[in-house]
Amino acid sequence: MECGIVGPPSSGKSTLFSILTNQEPGSFDCNSRETRRGVAKLNDHRLDELAAIVKARKIVHATVDYVDVPGFAAKSDKPEPYPAWYLSELRGTDMLAIVVRDFENPIVSHPSGSIDPLRDLSDAAFEFIISDLDVVERRLNRVSKMHDKESKAEAELLEKCRAHLSEDGSLRDLEFTQEEQKKLRGFSFLSLKPLLVILNLGDENAPEADDRLRTMQNKVDCLRDHVRWVAVAAGMESEINMLDEEERAPFMEELGFSLPALDRIIKATFELMGMITFLTIGPKESRAWSVTKGATAVKAARVIHEDIARGFIRAEMYNWKDLLDAGSEAEMKKTGKMRLEGKDYIMQDGDVMNVRFNV
C-alpha cells in the first residue's frame, strides 16, 4: 500500500514524511524533481505482546509506503500548485494525503502570502480534478473514433466522468458499479483516490485540533466520501520524537494528542483503505499482515504466499486476546477457542492464523 504525500511548500509535509518513515529531515531544492520514498511501521501492541509470549526471534510489523514529492517554486504570475510532473508521480500511489498548513511562522512564510488551509485544500482538489479531466478528454478523443461495443461502453463511462469533472466535482463523489470501477482503475484518477486530509498545526493551537478540524469539515461541501481527517503538529512532534520514548508522553499530552502522529496517521490510513490486520505467531517469526476488510481466509493466505493459498486445506484460527489471556499456546489450545476455518471464512481484525496446506 503506497500513499503519496501532497502539499505546497512550507506546509510541513517533508517534516511529516520524516516522522512517518524515521528518516532524517532534509531540505530539497524547490525545483528538484527528486522524490523521497520511505516505509512507516504500524506499531501494534498485539503483535509485540504475543511475540513475547512465544519468544519470537523476529518481529515484523505491517507497513505503509509513503512517497514525498518535493515542493517547487512557481515562476509565473499565476502559481501552478501542482505541476504535471508532480501529478504524474502521484498517479502510481494507492491513496493521497494532503498536508495543509494552519500555523504562523515569521521566518518561513506561506508561498501564497497568507495562512488559509481551506484554500490550500481546495487548490489541491481542483488541480486533481483538472488533471483528471485532461486524461478523460484525451482518452475520449481516441475511443470516440472506435465503434465496437466495448469502446462505446467506455465512452459512456468517460462521458459520465467528464460531466462531473467539468462541474468541478471529484470522481470519488460518484457512484460506480464494480465493473465500472474495474474499467477506471487503469486511469489512476487522482480525484478518485482515497484522500487523507492532514491539518498541520503549530504547538500553540494544537490543543484546539478537534475544533479546527471540525470547522474545516463544515466548510467543505465536497470531499465527503472516501476521505479521513487528521490533525498533527509536525514541527513540535518532530522535536518530541528526538527524545527518549519514556520522556515523550508529557509533551504529547501538552499538545493534546493521545497518540504520536505516526500512529494517528497510519491508523487513519488503514481505516481509509478499508484494511485490517491479522497475525501469524511463532518462535521463529511473528508477523502482522494487512488485508482488505471482508477478505476470505484463502485471500489472506495469498498475502503470506501464493503456494500457501494454492494448497490451502484449513486454517487454525483464534483471536489474539485468547492467547494473551491464556499465557501460552499450550494453555490457549486447552480453552477450545482455537477453531478450524475453511477458505470462505471472513477474516477479522486481530485474528491469528496458521494455515494447513499441501502443495
Image: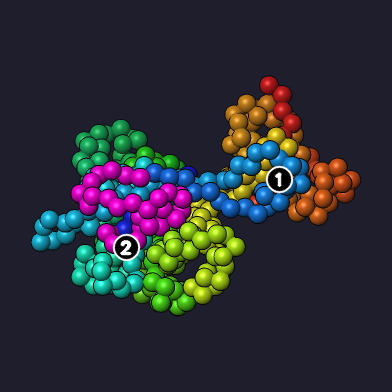
The amino acid type found where label 2 is placed reads Ser
Q: Position of residue 4 (x, y in %)?
A: 38, 50
Q: Which mark is residue 316?
A: none
Task: Please say whether residue 17 is one of the residues in the magenta stretch.
Answer: yes
Asked if residue 325 can be seen in this view, the reply is yes
- Report the residue at 21% width, 67% height from top: 112
Position of residue 123 in the picture relative to residue 260 (left or right) = left
- On screen, 334 above or below 305? below
- Report the residue at 25% width, 56% height from top: 127
Q: Position of residue 256 (x, y in %)?
A: 51, 74
Main secondary-structure element of the magenta-colored stretch? loop
Q: CA distance from mark 1 to mark 2?
A: 39 Å
Q: Which mark is residue 11?
A: 2
Q: Position of residue 58 (x, y in %)?
A: 65, 38
Position of residue 245 in the picture relative to residue 133 (left or right) = right
- Report the residue at 13% width, 61% height from top: 78
- On screen, 349 above or below 118? above
Q: Residues within 10 Å of mark 2 (few under 14, many from 20)?
A: many
Nearest to the observer: residue 287 or residue 2: 287
Q: How is the image coloured?
A: rainbow
Nearest to the observer: residue 213 or residue 53: 53
Q: What range is drawn magenta here?
A: 8-36
Q: Residues within 10 Å of mark 1 (few under 14, many from 20)?
A: many
Q: Which residue is mark 1?
A: 51
